[in-house]
Image (spheres, grey):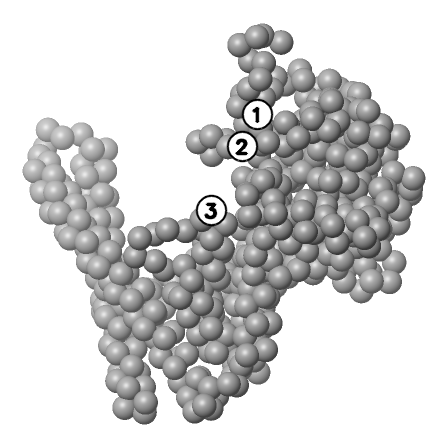
Amino acid sequence: MSTFLAGFDGLWARSIDDYKEAVKRYLIVLDTNVLLELYRFTPQARHELLDVLAQLDHRLWVPHQVAREYHNRRFEAVREHLNLYTSVPDGLNTLRNKALHEVQNLAKRCSMNDADKQLLTAPINDAFDKVAAEIRRHSDAFDLSLAKVVRDDPILSALSRILDGKTGDPFSDEDSDALIAEFQERVAEQIPPGYRDAGKSENAHGDFFVWEQLLREAAQRQTPVLLVTNDVKDDWVKKEAGFVVGARPELLEEFKERCNNDLLMTQLPHFLGMAKEVLGAAVSQSTMQQAKNVRDSGSERDVLVTLPSRHFGPIYNYIATYYENHYVRADGSLSSEEEGAAEETLRILNSMKIRKRNTHGDVLVAIPLECFERFRHYVSVQSAVGGTDSEGPEREDRTSEYRLLMNELADLRGLLESARKERDMAIAVVAENERAARNADSTTPDAERERLAREAKESRRKLLDTASSIHDLEMQIHAISRQLDSSRSVN
């Protein structure tokens, strides 16, 4: 190694040859998220990943904490994936209705007859129907169900064979207590990994336990380690300009100090690609693409939550009040831990604004998966302290609804301002395009005249769409303002 690089581990990216060498001879340690991805893969991709793991033989190992988290979360993993086949069509149906509503407004304002309206609405319905049918096809092809996983989980059966004798031992009770105390000290000093999870209501120490068990196993075996994980939180990896450089320098230093060996970290798509090249594993392009898609969409996965209508308002009110009291400071003085918690809390609040009701009147909200633990903590705390309002829950419900209306009004006003700016720009574009179309004379080629006329017509259509959106927003703002006036008179 160059003396110019020595001593700066973690501040520069390791070569692809280093990773290939690791796949060939290092101890391969799997994180929980890799095992849970098996519940999101198609049957073929799942089979190929399991074959790769089996091919590693004695060089494969999982910490006991990973096994514990896998067993605790495998039902949640398959449930979350199956929910996509219902939540996505529900979301698309909402978009369909919105699109049809916009067309109906346009048709009304332009006095279209039924035949003209049908020409506009039929393609929208056809497109959404085709997408819904394709989603049903994928749902029918997916071979797992919650009942099947509960009764006879094929993934659990496969992993029990592959990981037999390759799973670490648990900590003793005494050891666990001491390590949890150590974890709290590390959190206070923001020593990776795991301090980003310090606010979780459950298993906040999970990443630290994985790390400690990995260290002990590597030290005992005196072996270098390749950790395969899709976790790219900044208490695990160092990033620059959004790109992962590698493991945090602090982790590399601690690993070298305790194990006197090399540590590399990589994500599942990269690992599969190298296993195909270096080990000759049978990994299809489809499987690698699935691994990449699952990784890239990991931060976007949502957990669909159903809340009784009477509970939704108080829960939202509690979270919003907590956010204002703990994370809104004039000087902006938040620690990195508080910044992470504040960001998650704000994402929860924004998710709760986009709510709908089922046929029973319950409220449905989609909480980002990575924020779900914090959301569950807020719900449990609110449930414990709920009902203490001296004026009763009815007053609390009214207060919560008032807060929601105020937030919705602020959002709509922001959209209205943007729409008005868009309208002003559209007016200028229409004027320019129509002037260009008028100025075209007999010397202008036919194709150019047609293009200018087409652009003028399209810009005019966009202007009408924007005007219709502004009208709808103004009507919504008016309706919410009336609701707020009613709420004030009641309070």
- Percent across and percent down for residue 406 are 32, 73
Residue 470 marker: none
- Number of labels in the image equals 3
Q: Which residue is mark 3?
A: 336
Q: Quadrant of the C terminus?
A: bottom left
72 sits left or right of 424 in the view:
right
Is 31 left, or right, of 367 in this rendering? right
The answer to whether the residues at label 1 and label 2 have Cβ atoms under 8 Å apart is yes
Q: Gap between marks 1 and 2, in whole Å?
A: 7 Å
Residue 67 shows in the view: no
* Side (left or right) of 176 relative to 327: right
In the picture of the structure, the residue carrying the numbered disc 2 is 238
**Within-10-Å neighbours for mark 1: few <14, some 14–19, many 20+:** many
Q: Residue at x 54, y 71 (%)?
A: 364
Quick one: label 3, few (<14), some, or many (20+) residues within 10 Å? few
Whether residue 367 can be seen here: yes
Task: Pick whichever of labels 3 and 1 is earlier in the sequence.
Answer: 1
Work out whether mark 3 precedes mark 2 in sequence or the reverse, and give the earlier one: 2
